[in-house]
Amino acid sequence: METPVVSKNIGTLNGPLLVFGGVYSNLQALQALQALVQARGIPAHHIICTGDVVGYCADPEAVVQLVKAWGIHCIAGNVELQLRAGEADCGCDFNTGSRCDIFSRQWYPYAQQALSPDAIRWMADLPHHLRFQFAGLDGIVLHGSAHEVAGYVFASTPWAVKVQNFADTQTDLILAGHCGLPFSQHQGGQYWLNAGVIGMPANDGTPRVWYLIIDQDEQGQLRYTHHYFEYDHPAAAAKMRTHRLPEAYARTLETGLWDNCEILPEEETLAQGVALALV
């Protein structure tokens, strides 16, 4: 295998840009997003995926092939890094014996056996980061954090931690993923934007899933808006059950509630079941 591309510069981008992450092998959600994008007339080179194309749901191969054919910008999430390296787990560093750890022992081997050599080769070409310029800002797309691809950064994560990421990447704009929850924060001309994921709901008691649009205002300044959409989640859940994937995750697609809050800080745990109001 060739040396992986850690960072790829995709140059100066103009809006609007659509950002999403965490497809998690959810074909129904990805198809719904693609239809939405086509209706809005957003071209593939204005679309960015923050990784974890593969995950909990039932269609890893079909999802990879759709993203590959679409031709959008995409980075490797921890799941893609683990799969392309032939590792035995998803690389999320779940506590041994936790519910997330137990469930990953079901969906990750399923994804491994379902993926074609062509899909693995596609993953091998994905960069860890994308660098770009937008609205006069130096930006980077990363999965978890600048220091750990599977690092969890939430809205409640101290701003000082985010500032260190800006300093270490020499950027003012970070488009991140991995944590599963959409949020946006900015201070002092620096922006941390997480589009959320489309493969699972945001633990807010609704089956909605989220993406992000970034653009420029009349003065050329950055602006951003969070958006949600509905999709055929009953079909996605049914297909998970057909393939005997974790029932708890199939229920999550239907209820909008995560099975557990093991990875969440206290602030995000307390917000479980509270419908997000980001739009």
Image: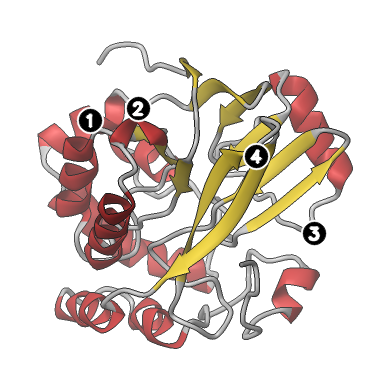
Q: Position of residue 139 (x, y in %)?
A: 62, 26
The amino acid type, in three-letter code, at marker 4 is Asp
Q: Tell me if 176 is positioned left or right of 80 in this view.
A: right
Is the residue marked by circle 3 packed among few (<14), some (14-19), or many (20+) residues within 10 Å? Answer: few
Q: Say if mark 3 contacts mark 4, CB within 8 Å.
A: no
The answer for how far apart the CA atoms under marks 1 and 3 are is 34 Å
Does 74 sit above or below residue 263? Answer: above
Q: Say if mark 1 contacts mark 2, CB within 8 Å.
A: yes
N-term-proximal mark, 4 vs 2: 2
Q: Position of residue 103 (x, y in %)?
A: 40, 69
Q: Which residue is mark 1?
A: 122
The amino acid type, in three-letter code, at marker 2 is Leu
Does 267 sit above or below residue 167? Answer: below
N-term-proximal mark, 1 vs 4: 1
Q: Which residue is mark 4?
A: 217
Kindly identify which numbered label has been placed on residue 152. none
Does 68 sit above or below residue 268? Answer: above
Q: Position of residue 140 (x, y in %)?
A: 59, 27
The amino acid type, in three-letter code, at marker 1 is Trp
Residue furthest to the top: 3
